[in-house]
């Protein structure tokens, strides 16, 4: 048996075909998810111009910069975004801050758009309403605590409801940090960066927070809660 027929007979030829070796796994780039409603859908609570800049420019930049950071670490591209930001220690130090800020920014905003809708708001309903009541008392107390937590976040960040160690927790994070980074599972969160409200509300973060409750999609929040608990 000559070398060629040996390779064909044993199947080694197919494995050894040079074109198979030249195929490299293309890193999957993150993409900006489209806003699930028109820019003006949340008027008058959140204005169209803010939504356009916030989604297209701010969220868009987090996605672009996350992809840029991951160019030097293609082995991380196969991880889900949750796995990536949930274990930042596994990210090379040179790109860790970029992945934390931009990966967090991408995750947080993707969540934020989905928990709002046109004609949203009203009292919570479904299982999350019962859980909120059990953990924080009535809806007014819960609302006040989320808003107060957002007001006390100095500078930029988020106010959150998340599940940690089986319990519902309200807390804030700085910058684009996300509860996932410390083992939490987000149920809902509100962006308190000035870019989220400054065009319409200027320095009045409290007014923006009050208005934001009129945009909430409780079905989406219930879906997050079901996944988190
Ligand atoms: Mn934002």
Image: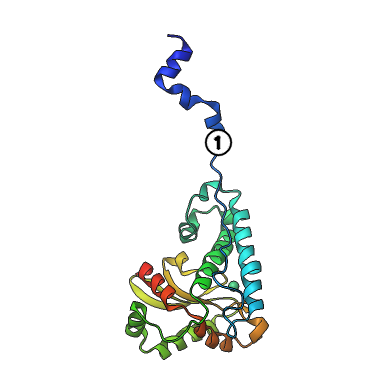
| Image quadrant where one finds the C terminus | bottom left
The x, y position of residue 149, in whole percent, is 49, 83
| Image quadrant where one finds the N terminus | top left
Say if 171 sits above or below 19 in the image: below
Q: Can residue 191 be seen from the camera position used here? A: yes
Disc 1 on helix, strand or loop?
loop
The x, y position of residue 193, in whole percent, is 60, 77
Q: Which residue is mark 1?
A: 23
The x, y position of residue 6, in whole percent, is 43, 14
Say if 181 sits above or below 130 in the image: above
94 or 19, which lies in front?
Answer: 19
Instruction: State which image quarter holds ligand 1.
Output: bottom right
Identify the residue at image location x=64%, y=67%. Answer: 56
The x, y position of residue 68, in whole percent, is 63, 54
Q: Can residue 195 be seen from the camera position used here? A: no
**Quarter of the image where one finds residue 199:** bottom right
14 or 146, which lies in front?
Answer: 14
By what rule are the colours in the image chosen?
A: rainbow
Q: Residue furthest top?
A: 1
146 or 50, which lies in front?
Answer: 50
**Quarter of the image where one finds residue 180:** bottom left
Say if 152 sits above or below 98 in the image: below
40 or 167, which lies in front?
Answer: 40
Identify the residue at image location x=40%, y=17%. Answer: 9
User: In the visual, does 9 lie left or right of 206?
Assistant: left
**Quarter of the image where one finds residue 207:** bottom right
């Amino acid at each position: 048996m000559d070398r060629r027929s040996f390779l064909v007979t044993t199947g080694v030829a197919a494995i050894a075909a040079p074109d198979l070796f030249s195929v490299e796994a293309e890193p999957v780039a993150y993409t900006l998810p489209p806003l699930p409603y028109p820019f003006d859908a949340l008027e008058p609570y959140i204005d169209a111009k803010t939504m356009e800049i916030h989604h297209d420019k701010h969220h868009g930049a987090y996605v672009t910069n996350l992809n840029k950071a991951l160019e030097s670490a293609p082995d991380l591209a196969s991880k889900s975004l949750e796995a990536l930001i949930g274990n930042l220690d596994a990210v090379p130090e040179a790109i860790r801050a970029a992945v934390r800020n931009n990966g967090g920014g991408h995750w947080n905003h993707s969540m934020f758009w989905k928990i709002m809708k046109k004609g949203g708001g009203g009292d919570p309903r479904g299982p999350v309403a019962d859980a909120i009541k059990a953990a924080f008392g009535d809806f007014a107390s819960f609302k006040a605590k989320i808003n107060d937590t957002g007001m006390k976040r100095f500078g930029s960040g988020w106010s959150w409801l998340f599940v940690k160690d089986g319990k519902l927790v309200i807390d804030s994070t700085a910058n684009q940090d996300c509860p996932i980074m410390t083992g939490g599972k987000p149920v809902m969160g509100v962006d308190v960066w000035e870019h989220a409200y400054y065009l319409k509300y200027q320095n009045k973060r409290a007014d923006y927070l009050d208005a934001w409750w009129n945009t909430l999609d409780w079905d989406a929040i219930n879906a997050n809660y079901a996944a988190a608990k």
